[in-house]
Image (cartoon, rainbow, N blue to C red):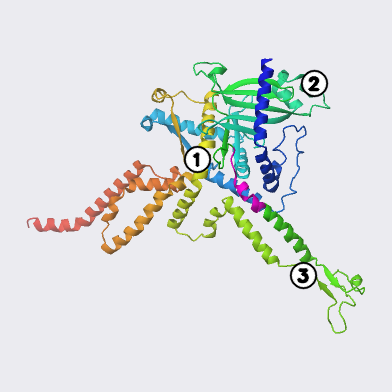
Amino acid sequence: MADDTRAAEIIAEQERLAVERSHLDQVREQIALRILPHYATRFQTQNRTVVTPVGQQNTQEMIDATGAYALMTFASINESMLTPHHARWHTVVPSDKYLLKDRATRLWFEELTDLLFALRYAPKANYASQKREDYMMLGAFGDGCLFIDALKTKYDKGFRYRAVHPGQIYFQDNHQGIIDKAFRRFSLTARQALQEFGTALPKEIQDQASDPRRNSTIHWFIHKVAPREDYDEERLDLRGMPHTSEYVSVTGKTMLREGGYHSFPYAISRYVTTPGEVNGRSPAMMALPSLKSLNEMKKTMLKQGHRVTDPILLAHDDGVADAIGFKPGTVVSGGVNADGKPLVHVLPTGNLAAGKDAMEAEVVSINNFFLVNMFRLLVDKPQMTATQVLEESREKGALLSPHMGRQQSESLGPQIEREIDLARELRLLRPMPPALLEARGQYSIQYDSPLSRMTRAEQSAGLWRTLENLMGVVQVTQDLSPLDHYDWDEIVPDISDDASIPARWRKSMEKVLAMRDGRAKQAQEQQLLQAAPAASNVLKTLMPQ
């Protein structure tokens, strides 16, 4: 009875959140129909027992594909700027930088970073594709959600990622604005539910699962994750886990499974939020008027285009129109009078150029909302100098930093924390070295993505601006001493990092010093060789006859 009461409470709480979000879901449905049609019809599924048929297009509102293409570009921009799959976009380091002097601690964190990337981009993890879906949802609907769990196979240990449809996830934040409670409402067939929950299911679902004629019946379930009110970190049972995990069957209002998590399993991020709102708002929401206008303009232009290519003919009611043929080479008798004046005319179709200009204006607006035009600059201006490229990178970094910085704090940070916790649970981590164990394993995440390097481009751009001015002084005075103020052994490695030059392409400082010593010795030997003839003449002069 207590379990049934608890299940009813969870269902009622989720339904209340669904009612509060109903207006937002209506807007999201409009967006999905115009730029992401395979996500449509899934935002209001509270009592639906039939899911959208596989392969259904839902493109009845998608007349123009500009918005869909801009959304794909937006996802690619986020992926390339934040989580490029071909590069190490973050490292894990000790919170106390003094511990980096301890070789064992430094090696432990290097191994941890390598392990995270190996598990994250393993084929069975499915991270790259699911993270791209996450970026697509962020651009279209304002919320992105990635569920991170251990890989459930008999022989492999690893991670598994799943992007959650924004129509299925409901969440709340705490007093500090941190998302700490989530409800995922998802559907399973009776057969799938029996595989997942077994005999804990209501008898109605179990009976359907055993009947081949009814085992594809859809049923709805809720997964709730929330902070544990009776959490005790000293406990080894469920009370020792900071987050609760509860699965409920909506059919029969039955509690199916209770558990817990040491870390929040949903990495949820928002594009931008209005004060007082929990759910995010997306570029597509701001571009929705332009998306609707562009679709209507496209309809009109298509109609006008048909009239231009297959025009409507105007003729006097004298039977001439009945004799007109439209096949090439057809001779129409009576189409002109004896003086050669046409008796059949084309209905004017209006000014197509004006409609085209109006459509192009809406396309520019949509691309601006999805950040597309910002990244066309280097393509449109390939002749830019290195200094100009640095300046553009600095400006882009300043414009993108607020949005993408939020993704680092709300999505990537919790994701990495969850991954480290899973690696610990799967016993994939080596024991901590004594120095780190004494510091209680405190760690920090350092991002080294292209976006992070863009935000650091201000330093490189400032250096090159200063050098351009100094070189003018050097050329006038023929004095190189102004350059003595700069430590090039510090500058060159930092500029190389900002330019994404791989570390394996660069020599270590030891090799650089050895090369300098070799050049110094070679120069000294050259000086001795050049001075040898003069020294020989001096000796000959000083020697007695």
Vertical placement of 262 versus 506: above or below?
Answer: above
What residue is rendered at 73% in x and 67% in y? 350
Tell me the crowding category of disc 2: few under 14, some 14 to 19, or many 20 or more residues within 10 angstroms, Cα based.
some
Tell me the crowding category of disc 1: few under 14, some 14 to 19, or many 20 or more residues within 10 angstroms, Cα based.
some
**Marks 3 and 1, how far apart at CA:** 59 Å
The numbered mark, 3 or 1, whose residue comes first in the sequence reads 1
**Marks 2 and 1, how far apart at CA:** 50 Å
Amino acid at dot 3: Pro
Q: Is residue 368 visible?
A: yes
Numbered mark located on residue 315 in the image: none
**For the N terminus, which image quadrant?**
top right
**Residue receiving disc 2:** 207
Q: Is residue 501 visible?
A: no
**Residue receiving disc 1:** 89
Q: Which residues are magenta?
A: 279-291
Residue 13 appears at what percent x and percent y? 65, 27
**Residue receiving disc 3:** 348
**Marks 3 and 2, how far apart at CA:** 68 Å
| Mark 2 residue element | helix
| Mark 3 residue element | loop
What residue is rendered at 74% in x and 24% in y? 251
Q: Quadrant of residue 258?
A: top right
Magenta stretch, main secondary structure, is: helix
